[in-house]
Image: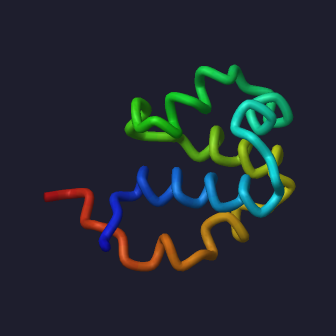
Amino acid sequence: MVLKTQEAVVARIKNLCSEKNMKISQLAYVSGMPPSTLKNIMKGNSKNTGIVTIKMICDGLNVSLEDFFHNGVFRDLEQEIK
């Protein structure tokens, strides 16, 4: 299955939260962002999550940006420009 970039970001966040036994609400708290912001990302209401927001999420998960993106879910993404 080929994912869009935003779907891959959501899948990666879910995977990392699962690995760390962390709920989305906990992640929002430790990332220093409103829970509504993270929930909008996870529900697909936010279509273009910025790199600074992803970095905040990585900080909350205690992973580097490199580790976040170094995952198979980002290998074969759907072409965004059509």
Residue at 42% from the left image edge and 40% from the top image edge: 48
Residue at 35% from the left image edge and 70% from the top image edge: 77
Residue 39 at what x, y percent from top left?
57, 30
Classify residue 15 by image quadrant. Answer: bottom right
Task: Out of 51 and 11, give the one closest to the viewer.
Answer: 11
Residue at 63% from the left image edge and 75% from the top image edge: 70
Vertical placement of residue 81 versus 48, above or below: below
**Quadrant position of the C terminus in the picture:** bottom left
**Quadrant position of the N terminus in the picture:** bottom left
Task: Out of 40 and 20, give the one closest to the viewer.
Answer: 20
Residue 3 at what x, y percent from top left?
35, 64
Residue 56 at what x, y percent from top left?
74, 41
Residue 43 is left or right of residue 16, and the answer is left
Going by the picture, which residue comes out furthest to the left?
82
Residue 67 is left or right of residue 29, and the answer is left
Residue 74 is left or right of residue 15, and the answer is left
Task: Out of 12 and 66, give the one closest to the viewer.
Answer: 12
What color scheme is it? rainbow
